[in-house]
């Protein structure tokens, strides 16, 4: 049945431009599926796709992008679902698409929220070297900056700083798009030519604008999945004529936008027609289009009070121009009402968004906590059941052996008695003594045999019981801190929201994300400890020759976003390749724990470096040593803790969780060193940082 469902899912994606061998690798790959929004929704509804798979991630992105193109509502819940799946599958493209969709959706009415998402998306597209994604983010920044409402703001930057930044964005966009061969990039290139203001480049002549307009429409005619860009091309052409101060042309293309069969006119299109009528002092026509624009925005986007304020201001001027003072005063009152609501609305929207994010994070944390508790209970029950079954089987085996021994003993006694009766007739005294001695020795041997077996069994049971108790102690020790921190953060977050300290709320949310990452590493450590000597006797991971550089790079990429959030500089200095004999799982666990320890103890503004160096061998000049160093500028390790760690890594003392603050991660690292024979050293100075060095001899 599951193969049939997968077959239907793949067929659905083939019809939308996908193939079962193609996974989206850029912004462009989602455009064709997004054009078929209804078909995508049918695929999601009719096929039981694994909601945790990468296929479902790409399906969600295409659906939300299609909804954005049709101006449908997009929820924070769907955004969070995409981010969660993208994080799970380590998809930087998925995160970039999620931020781009939310940024574009919030462009009208929540500009600061949109700006933050677009900045994140641009960085992630750049990391992926996704040219189309970078071009779309740059184009969004330029369009938003050219809005005619001076009250729009975009984060902490001033209008002058934004002008300087967007001049650079303009040059970067034009350079990328001009070299690109893809239709979406070329359309954006022509669109930028059409509405570029004199502040960004030299004045574009009217002939060049007409050529760009024609070229863009020809591309759209050949690519139906890009038809949603038709409105943007017409609006850009209007904006270009506005810069040329040709108001009649602005009006001409505004009316063409309203009447074009590919464009479903909205309030912005009606507003763009009313503007030229006001400049031409044709107030009656301006009033008609402004009232229609206001009617539509109250249906489509009633929370966009900035646009409502701007259009009521223009409606006021138009009524005053016709001499209708009563209607003009009414429009002026509406303008004042929306003007007063702007700051209050901005605050309410921000608080609502933070509360919604908090609610989602709180639910996710609760689900993870319940799942962890369930896993612990199941593991404990399985362990107890297994121990009971093993003890019962051992007792039955011992009883069977005892019964068999008794039976054999009785048989031996009968045989001996029969022989004694026969031998008594010939040599009663001599042979009688010999037979008695033989029986005694046999009984002693049997007793010693079973005593040895029982002692060995008791020793094994005691070792298992001690391992179980130690495992419970480790779980309680390492889970106590994150659960306690989560409880403290919950109370603090409630107080911060109540007091309206929104900047602090963002910091607390990031702390929750860090605790989630640390808890996940803790669970992995607990699982590896559970598979160690106490529960899988004699089972070890076999070392193998392999290139460790890609493995280290993958681990570093995982920790890079957390370092950026904490404002910690993260650098690597690695050769192109380096082959070593290692146990891959143990090596990965060791590097992850060392990086996690470095990031946890390095404050904001500090640095972490990961280097591989070649050292000459002091024993044999012909051989070399390879050293992996993980260095941080954190708070360092106290002298008594440092001496204890050095003894542990040198094999002079057995590591115990809780001794001198020793965590489970360091215990697992010491096990890796003992089993794989690298030399591990640690150097640290309080207040200056710590350096862990793993050395292999080639």
Image (tube, rainbow, N blue to C red):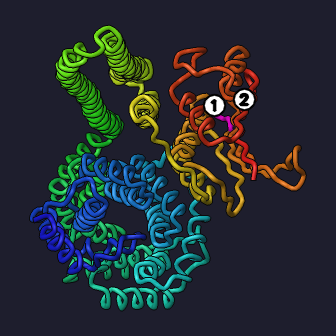
Which SS class for mark 2? strand
Magenta-colored stretch includes residue 294: no
Instruction: Check the image and report above or below for 194 versus 55.
Output: below
Counting residues from the start of the chain, the first of labels 2 and 1 encountered is 1
133 and 428: which is toward the camera: 428
Instruction: Check the image and report above or below for 3 versus 570.
Output: below
Q: Determine the CA span between mark 2 and mark 1.
A: 8 Å
Residue carrying label 1: 602
* Left or right: 31 in relation to 548: left
Q: Residue at x 68, y 62 (%)?
A: 577
* Left or right: 210 in relation to 396: right
Q: Quadrant of residue 564?
A: top right
Which region of the structure is painted magenta? 602-607
Residue 598 seen in the current view: yes
Q: Residue at x 49, y 63 (%)?
A: 125
Q: Are marks 2 and 1 in contact (CB under 8 Å)?
A: yes
Disc 2 residue crowd, few under 14, some 14–19, many 20+, Cα 10 Å:
many
Disc 1 residue crowd, few under 14, some 14–19, many 20+, Cα 10 Å:
many
Q: Residue at x 46, y 91 (%)?
A: 211
Which SS class for mark 1? loop
The image shows residue 22 at horizontal and vertical percentages of 35, 75
The image shows residue 264 at horizontal and vertical percentages of 19, 73
27 and 655: which is toward the camera: 655
Q: Quadrant of residue 364?
A: top left
Which mark is drawn over residue 689? Answer: 2
The image shows residue 432 at horizontal and vertical percentages of 30, 11
């Amino acid at each position: 049945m599951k193969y049939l469902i997968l077959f239907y899912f793949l067929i659905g994606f083939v019809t939308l431009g996908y193939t079962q061998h193609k996974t989206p690798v850029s912004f462009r790959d989602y455009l064709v599926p997004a054009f078929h929004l209804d078909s995508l929704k049918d695929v999601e509804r009719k096929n039981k796709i694994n909601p945790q798979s990468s296929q479902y991630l790409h399906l969600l992105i295409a659906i939300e992008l299609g909804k954005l193109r049709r101006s449908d509502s997009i929820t924070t819940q769907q955004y969070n679902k995409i981010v969660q799946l993208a994080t799970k599958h380590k998809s930087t493209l998925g995160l970039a698409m999620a931020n781009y969709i939310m940024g574009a959706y919030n462009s009208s009415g929540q500009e600061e929220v949109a700006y933050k998402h677009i900045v994140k998306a641009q960085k992630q597209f750049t990391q992926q070297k996704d040219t189309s994604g970078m071009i779309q983010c740059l184009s969004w920044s330029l369009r938003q900056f050219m809005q005619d409402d001076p009250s729009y703001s975009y984060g902490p930057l001033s209008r002058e700083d934004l002008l300087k930044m967007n001049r650079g964005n303009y040059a970067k966009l034009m350079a990328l798009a001009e070299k690109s061969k893809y239709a979406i990039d070329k359309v954006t290139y022509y669109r930028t030519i059409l509405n570029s203001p004199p502040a960004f480049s030299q004045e574009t002549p009217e002939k060049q604008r007409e050529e760009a307009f024609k070229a863009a429409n020809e591309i759209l005619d050949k690519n139906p999945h890009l038809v949603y860009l038709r409105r943007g091309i017409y609006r850009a052409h209007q904006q270009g004529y506005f810069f040329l101060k040709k108001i009649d042309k602005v009006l001409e293309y505004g009316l063409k936008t309203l009447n074009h069969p590919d464009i479903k006119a909205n309030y912005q299109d009606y507003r763009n027609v009313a503007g030229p009528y006001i400049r031409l002092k044709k107030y009656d026509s301006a009033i008609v289009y402004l009232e229609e624009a206001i009617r539509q925005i109250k249906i489509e986007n009633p929370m966009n009070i900035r646009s409502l304020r701007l259009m009521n201001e223009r409606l006021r001027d138009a009524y005053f121009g016709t001499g209708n003072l009563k209607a003009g005063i009414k429009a002026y009152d509406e303008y004042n009402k929306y003007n007063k609501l702007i700051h209050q609305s901005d605050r309410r929207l921000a608080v609502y968004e933070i509360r919604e994010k908090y609610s989602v994070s709180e639910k996710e944390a609760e689900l993870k906590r319940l799942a962890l508790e369930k896993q612990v209970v199941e593991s404990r029950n399985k362990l107890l059941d297994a121990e009971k079954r093993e003890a019962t089987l051992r007792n039955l085996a011992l009883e069977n052996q005892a019964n068999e021994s008794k039976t054999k003993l009785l048989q031996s006694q009968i045989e001996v008695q029969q022989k004694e009766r026969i031998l008594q007739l010939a040599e009663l005294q001599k042979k009688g003594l010999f037979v008695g001695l033989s029986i005694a020795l046999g009984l002693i041997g049997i007793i010693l045999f079973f005593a040895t077996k029982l002692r060995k069994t008791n020793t094994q049971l005691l070792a298992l019981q001690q391992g179980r108790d130690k495992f419970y102690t480790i779980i309680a020790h390492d889970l106590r801190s994150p659960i306690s921190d989560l409880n403290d953060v919950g109370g603090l977050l409630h107080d911060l929201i109540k007091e309206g300290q929104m900047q602090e709320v963002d910091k607390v949310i990031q702390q929750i994300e860090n605790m989630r990452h640390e808890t996940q590493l803790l669970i992995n450590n607990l699982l590896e400890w559970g598979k160690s000597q106490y529960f899988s006797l004699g089972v070890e991971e076999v070392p193998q020759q392999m290139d460790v550089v890609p493995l280290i790079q993958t681990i570093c990429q995982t920790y890079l976003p957390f370092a950026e959030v904490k404002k910690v500089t993260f650098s690597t200095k690695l050769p192109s390749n380096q082959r070593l004999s290692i146990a891959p799982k143990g090596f990965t666990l060791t590097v992850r724990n060392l990086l996690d320890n470095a990031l946890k103890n390095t404050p904001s503004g500090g640095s972490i470096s990961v280097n591989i160096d070649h050292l000459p061998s002091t024993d044999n000049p012909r051989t070399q040593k390879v050293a992996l160093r993980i260095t941080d500028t954190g708070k360092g390790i106290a002298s008594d803790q440092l001496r204890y760690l050095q003894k542990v890594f040198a094999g002079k003392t057995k590591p115990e969780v809780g001794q001198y603050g020793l965590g489970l991660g360091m215990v697992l690292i010491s096990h890796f060193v003992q089993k794989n024979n690298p030399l591990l050293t640690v150097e640290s100075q309080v207040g200056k940082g710590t350096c862990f060095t793993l050395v292999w001899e080639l």
